[in-house]
Amino acid sequence: MSDTPSDDLSLTGRAALPEGYAFLLAAYPRAVWDEHPNNGQWCSFWLERHQMFRDFSAALADACAQLADGEVEAQAFHEWFLPRVNFYFGEIDTHHKVEEYNYFPALARADAQMARGIALLEGDHRAVHDLLLAAHQAVVALDGAIRETPAEVAAAAPRAHDGLAALGAGLGRHLDDEEDIIVPLILDRSEPVLGIG
Ligand SMILES: [Fe+2]
Ligand SMILES: [Fe+2]
């Protein structure tokens, strides 16, 4: 089997992880994660970051929908939205770099069965990056419309919503699958043994 994810495993193509990728999930289902003694400082912080991304994805797309529906005034929207969307884009990028440079190599070394899961997650990062660039373009257009061409806000707001919703959907799939692949390994081996945390 190739280590490169095929098209059916692409982030936007798959509905769930195929058999064998989350090979320890049955032994460590989500219901036991919170209270497990090996859910250490690094793991709990990392899961909180993931939840923050989910919350930002929903809130930012929702704000654009409210603007598109005329439920919020453009200037008030702009003041709330711009710093948050810039933070969100920047943090996604940083989070992925830290995973790729620091954590994925350590996790891949820990067990031969992790290699294809890590390859899949790295492919996801590239797909999320493309979704992020598209969302960023739509957000830049909306920012420009609010600042300079208010008549274009009505068309730019739904496009920004759609870009952020697509990013949120892809990122959400990635976060769920990443957790199902990685958290059970941490609970099975512990952070010190894996050399993380
Ligand atoms: Fe990731
Ligand atoms: Fe992550």
Image (cartoon, grey):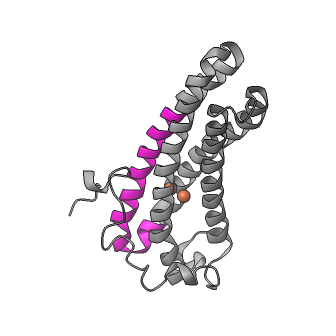
For residue 136, say whether it is visible.
no
Magenta span of residues: 107-135
Determine if the magenta segment contains residue 132: yes
Task: Pick whichever, 194 or 140, lies toward us.
Answer: 140
Looking at the figure, which quarter contains the C terminus? bottom right
Q: Is residue 136 magenta?
A: no
> How many labels sit on residues?
0
Q: Position of residue 162 (x, y in %)?
A: 51, 37
Left or right placement of residue 131 versus residue 149 in this view: left
- Pinpoint residue 85: horizontal percent, then vertical percent: 66, 39
- Of all residues, the one furthest to the left in this rendering is 1
Secondary structure that dominates the magenta span: helix
Give me the residue at 53% from left, 61% from top.
Answer: 103
Please name the residue shown 38% across and 69% down the image: 114
Looking at the picture, how far across and down is residue 76, in whole percent? 79, 31
Quarter occupied by residue 181: bottom left
Relative height, residue 45 to residue 167 (above, below): below
Identify the image quadrant of the N terminus: bottom left
Residue found at x 67% / y 16%: 150
- In the figure, 59 relative to 188: above or below? above
Of 131 and 119, which appears nearest the observer? 131
For the question of whether residue 145 can be seen, the reply is yes
Image position of 6 with respect to 86: above or below: below
Please state the horizontal and vertical placement of residue 98, each as a whole percent of the image: 57, 53
Q: Residue at x 57, y 84 (%)?
A: 32
Q: Is residue 144 above or below residue 52?
A: above
Residue in the foreground of this view, choosing between 184 and 109:
184
